[in-house]
Every structure is written in C-alpha cells, then in structure tokens.
Image (cartoon, rainbow, N blue to C red):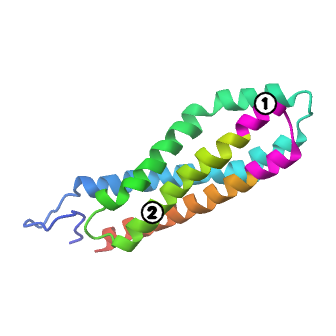
Amino acid sequence: MTQLSSAPSTTSTARPGWRVWNLAAVAALTAYSTGIAWQAQRVSYPLYRTVSAEEFPSYHLAYNDAIPGVVIIPGFVGFLACAAFPWTRPAGVPRAAAAVVAVSGVGSLLGTVLWAIPRHDLLDRIGQDPATITSLIQANGLRTALLTLGAVTLSWSLVRLIRR
C-alpha cells in the first residue's frame, strides 16, 4: 500500500502526516501564485503600456486596491512557506528539493520586496513610465521563473511521495 506518512507506520492504512499535508498545501499555494505571476507577466503588466498617461494614476491605484486578497496575501504566505520548507518537508522529500523550494521562496520574496514593490511605488509617484514598466516586467519575470521552479519541485515531491 502507498504510504504517505512522513514517519514509518506500523499499520497497513497509513494516514498522511502533517508534513505531507503541509507539502500539499504549499504546492497548491505556490501553483496558485505561479499562475498569478504568469498572468501578470503576460497580461496585466504589459497592459500598463496601453492605458493613457492621464488615466494611468487612477488605473494603477485601482489595481493596487484590488490585489491584496488575491495576490499579495497568498503570495507572501507562499514565499514564507517555501522558505521554511527545509524544516517542514516530509522525510521522503530530498533535501536538495527542499533547498530548491526554499531558494524559490526567498528569491521571490526578495525580488518582490527589493525590486517589484519599489517599481510599483515609483509608478504611483511618477505615473506611467515605459522604463519603469519594463523594469517591473523584468522583476516579475524573475519572480515568475522562481515560482515556476518552486511549483514544479513541490509537485514532483508530492507525486514522488504518493507513488511510494
């Protein structure tokens, strides 16, 4: 029988331990944030260039007001959960995979705090600016790549445990 527990079981009907449930939750949250990042990369941020300069400040403010519950909160929770994954990983997940997940979380967090958020703040101050929008897309490109790497690694880890 497939064993999902992070600790050896003495029964034939092993239940997944909290670490396996945590892995599933972190994988789902990271996959969600990855989808959001790809959408921003391919749709939202490029469309910043199509809004008129006069309407851009109100558009960007409305965008900022709309994203906390669907982008910011899940994103930061996911970044931190990935960063902590080496300490919460199930025993069947290789340390190297946990390290990749941690790097994806820390890198996404740093890229967001040190690069993407300052670009958004600059757009709030100066309005629509092609160079700032390009830099924001580059910052999000880094975050998107890191989140994709984390999501793939977490999904691989979960499938690997389920197949054991």
Rendering quarter of residue 23: bottom left
Q: Main secondary structure of the magenta part?
A: helix
Q: Which residue is mark 1?
A: 125
Residue placed most toward the observer, 1 or 111: 111
Q: Residue at x 76, y 37 (%)?
A: 122
Q: Is residue 7 left or right of residue 118?
A: left
Q: Which mark is residue 91?
A: none
Point out residue 39 in the picture as x, y percentages from the top left corner.
69, 50
Q: Please give the count of numbered marks on the rendered protein.
A: 2
> Residue at the location (24% across, 70% down)?
2
Q: Which residues are magenta?
A: 120-136
Q: Is residue 122 visible?
A: yes
**Residue density around tag 2, few if under 14, some if 14–19, many if 20 or more, within 10 Å:** many
Quarter residue 161 falls in? bottom left
In contact (CB < 8 Å): disc 1 and disc 2: no
Q: Quadrant of the N terminus?
A: bottom left
Instruction: Say what secondary structure mark 2 lies in.
Output: helix
Left or right for 99, reference 120: left
Q: Is residue 122 magenta?
A: yes
Q: Residue 59: horizontal and vertical position, in percent?
A: 80, 29
Neighbor class of circle 1 (other Cα within 10 Å; few <14, some 14-19, many 20+) is few
Position in image of residue 54 (x %, y %): 92, 27
Residue 88 in magenta stretch: no
Horizontal arrangement in the rendering, residue 145 relative to residue 21 (left or right): right
Q: Which residue is mark 2?
A: 101
| Viewport quadrant of the C terminus | bottom left
Q: Position of residue 134 (x, y in %)?
A: 81, 51
Q: Is residue 36 visible?
A: no
Q: Which residue is at a point 40% across and 50% down the rendered structure image?
A: 81
Say what amino acid the circle numbered 2 marks: Val
